[in-house]
Image: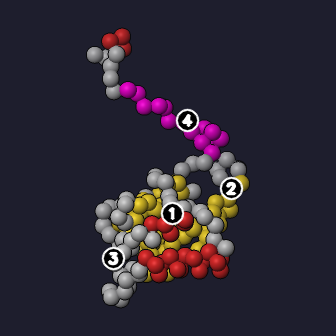
Amino acid sequence: MPTNSNITMKLSVVKEQLDNLNAIIFELPNGHFVPAHFHVTEVGMVTKNFIDCGGTVRAEKTISFQLWEDQDVDHRLAPQKLKNIIELSEQKLGLEDLEVEVEYQGETIGRYGLDFNGSHFLLTNTMTDCLAKDKCGIPEPEPAQSSCCSPESGCC
């Protein structure tokens, strides 16, 4: 199951940020930007029901945006237009105020978390994780040791 390395924005926060923007910009984790002529081809709620490796039944719901680009380089999605699409999706699909994940085509379809840096949206890396470490025998990481040596430690 993916877990985000950064906190993912909720849908209500995305809408608030759109109110303050003149243009929508998405930055990928590698520092490159999604081309300005992208389309948002889908807004939806994704429900995932699953069993983790420890046998616990789990459910996850997220809001999904799918970004797509093509040859239409003159296309520009205005912030108010995206907000209108989101609000229509809320009405028609009964979307909840959930965390937003973004799908974007790289070498394959990537799933990203979403953050905001004050001027544009940041697509953040997601990572898999074992949800049943206690049942799988995977030890919890030990707390980081201080880099300072104490005189009684013998390391100085």
* Quadrant (top left/top right/bottom left/bottom right) for the N terminus: bottom right
Eye-nearest disc, 2 or 3: 3
* Residue range of the region highlighted in magenta in the rendering: 132-146
| Prevailing secondary structure class for the magenta stretch in the rendered image | loop
Q: CA distance from mark 3 to mark 4?
A: 43 Å
Q: CA distance from mark 1 to mark 3?
A: 23 Å
Eye-nearest disc, 4 or 2: 2
Eye-nearest disc, 1 or 4: 1
Q: Earlier in the sequence, mark 1 or mark 4?
A: 1
Q: Is residue 148 visible?
A: yes
Across and down, in percent, residue 73 comes to: 32, 86
Q: Is residue 122 above or below residue 21?
A: above
Across and down, in percent, residue 82 comes to: 48, 78
Toward which corner of the image does residue 105 lie, by quadrant?
bottom left
Give the labeled residue for mark 4: 139
Toward which corner of the image does residue 22 lie, by quadrant?
bottom left
